[in-house]
Structures are given as C-alpha cells and as structure tokens.
Amino acid sequence: MSAVRRVGFVVNEHKPEARPLVESLGGFLRERGVEFFGERDNAEALGLTPAPQSAFCQADLCVVLGGDGTLLRAARLLGDGEVPLFGVHLGSLGFMTEIPVDDALPLLGEVIEGRFEVQPRVKLVVSLCRDGDEVAAADTTDSAGENSRPVPPAQVLNEAVVMKGALSRIIELDTRIDGLPVASFRADGVIVSTPTGSTGYSLSAAGPILDPTLSAILVTPICPHTLAQRPIVIPGNRRVELSLRPGCSEVFLTLDGQLGWPLRPRDRVRVEVAPSRVMLVRNPRLDFFTILRSRLGWGGGR
C-alpha cells in the first residue's frame, strides 16, 4: 500500500505547461488509487476536483506546480499543518521549487511509496499591534486589494516587509530585539526574513544569503539613509519589533508579497519564529549550493 493516499495540488494555472503536467501526474496517481484534488479557485480549469482548505491540511502530500510564489501560497494555505510540499519548478528562479519537470513523475513515484526526505524550513509569526491590540483579520487585504481573512498572527515563509509607498518620504522605524533597542532605521523600509527568504527581497536589498536550514531571523534595511546601518542576523529564539514613528505616512506591511496592511503612526509589528515548520520534499539530485550556482549564474563547482 502506498504511504501517500491523499494529494492536494496547488498550481499556477497561468503557466502553459501546468495543465498537461497536472493531467500526467493526476493519471499516475489515479492508477495507484491515490485521491487527489485542487484549489477551489482554479481546480475545474485544470481538470481537478475542487476542495476546501481543510482538505489540504489533512492531505499526505501537497504538489506545487509553479515558482516560489506558488509555493508561498501553498505554505499559507496549509497554515500550521506540516504537510510535505513537493515543489515542481515552473518559474524563473525557483529557489524553493527544486524538482524539474522531467523529474517530477519518477520522483513522485518514490514519494507516494514513502521513499523521500523532507527539509524543515523556519516560518515567522507576524503580529500587527495598534493602540495596544492586534489588528482584526477583516482589516487585511491581499496584493490585489481584495479582502483576505487569515487569523492574526499571520505566518510567512519568506519575509515581512514594512515599506513606504511610492510617493511617500523616507520613514523611521524604531527596531527592538527582545525589547532591547537596536536601531532607529531611517530608510525606505525594513525586511524581516527567514533564512529561506534570504534569497528573496532581502537579497535584492544587499542582505546576506543564509543556509535555509538555519533557525535564524534576518533584519535588512531597504536603502538606509546612512551606510552604517547594515543587515543583522539573530538567533531564531529572539523576537523583533518594528515601531513606526509619528509623522510617517503611506506605509505598508506586506507578508510574502501576497498579503498587506496599511500602517499608521505608532503601529508596532512583532516578528518571531513560528512553532510549526514548512516541510519541503528534497530533490536527492540537488543541494542548496548547486541551486545557488544555477539560479544566480555563479558558475564553478566543476
């Protein structure tokens, strides 16, 4: 009997190769008596049975077809559920979606038989406090401006970003770690990321690359007013707090680039490591440094 009996699909339906790949993998699963389903929003377009979020949390495996943005959506969909994520690379960079399309079918066969390894990745819990209280879930919006209802505190796999709007001036953020003052960042914003997220937005803001298996938090200022303000890496058992000073306007908190809040002066954003982890199915033919060389064009290693 297969070790995996229920599989959820999270798919970027805009990729032209997505539908044929769903059909191929779905047919493979059907032949082995494995139940599979998709998200309500795009399941029918992909030939999948629609299922609620609760079905994904109870699945044995989640197959992700897309890029890192699709995997981030899948991680948010699972919430605290530590369901293994089988990420097939259909994107441009793909630091987290490790499995090439050509290897997807044979590797999926190994996974459903229980012959696979997972790599735990740290998530962050992000809380927004206003006037001493956490902001209600109904106050959140996604990147398209539509209502979204995650229950605060929200969780992220890559990063939380406090950043000024396009036309607003430089902002000031008082930063504390475990309640101790660290810096008053005068910058375009601050990124608080996981080691996994160190190859995302933080990297473009001159942050360091961290091994994704570390338990750590990375704090990276965006275009700081002074060159003395640099990224900071702290242990995963610490808590970061960003406080928006009075006089700052058009400032936003975004989570993994997919959810967002407008901020007000004196709002406080608290970030700490989540108790649950994201479990990524490892590609046995790849390691982190091979991915870096390939995605960033470093060369070498021959």
Image: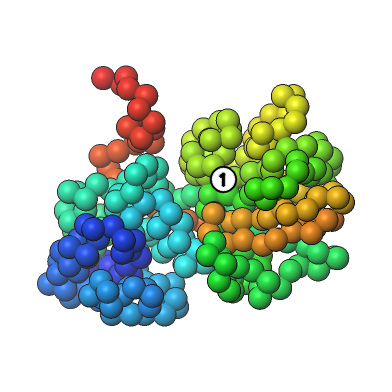
Q: Which residue does the numbered mark 1 point to in the structure image?
A: 194
| Percent x, y of residue 14 | 31, 61
Q: Quadrant of the N terminus?
A: bottom left
Where residue 188 appears, x then y in whole percent?
69, 41
Return the x and y of residue 193 as percentages of the image width and height.
59, 45
Residue 286 showing in the rendered view: yes
Residue at (74, 59) in percent of width and height: 263
- Count up the numbered dots: 1
- Picture residue at 40% right of the left edge, 72% below the top: 56
Where 140 sits versus 282, above or below? below
For this rendering, which residue is in front, 229 or 274? 229
Q: Is residue 61 visible?
A: no
Mark 1: secondary structure: loop
Image-quadrant location for residue 224: top right
Q: Compared with residue 229, is residue 175 higher up or lower down, i.e. above or below?
A: below
Judging depth in this view, the residue of 191 and 106 nearest the camera is 191
For the point 71% across and 73% down, which residue is it?
136
Please give left or right for residue 48 compared with residue 239 in the image.
left
Q: For the residue marked with disc 1, what is the amino acid? A: Thr
Q: Residue sitting at 17 percent across and 63 percent down?
A: 20
In the displayed structure, does residue 210 sit left or right of residue 109? right
Q: Nearer the viewer, residue 247 or 19?
A: 247
Say few, some or many: other residues with alpha carbon within 10 Å of mark 1 (under 14 / 14 to 19 / 20 or more): many
Q: Name the residue at the front extreme.
A: 167
Q: How is the image coloured?
A: rainbow
Q: Is residue 204 left or right of residue 223?
A: left
Identify whether 221 is placed above or below 12: above
Q: Position of residue 219 (x, y in %)?
A: 66, 39
Quadrant the C terminus occupies: top left
In the displayed orientation, state which residue is furthest to the left: 31
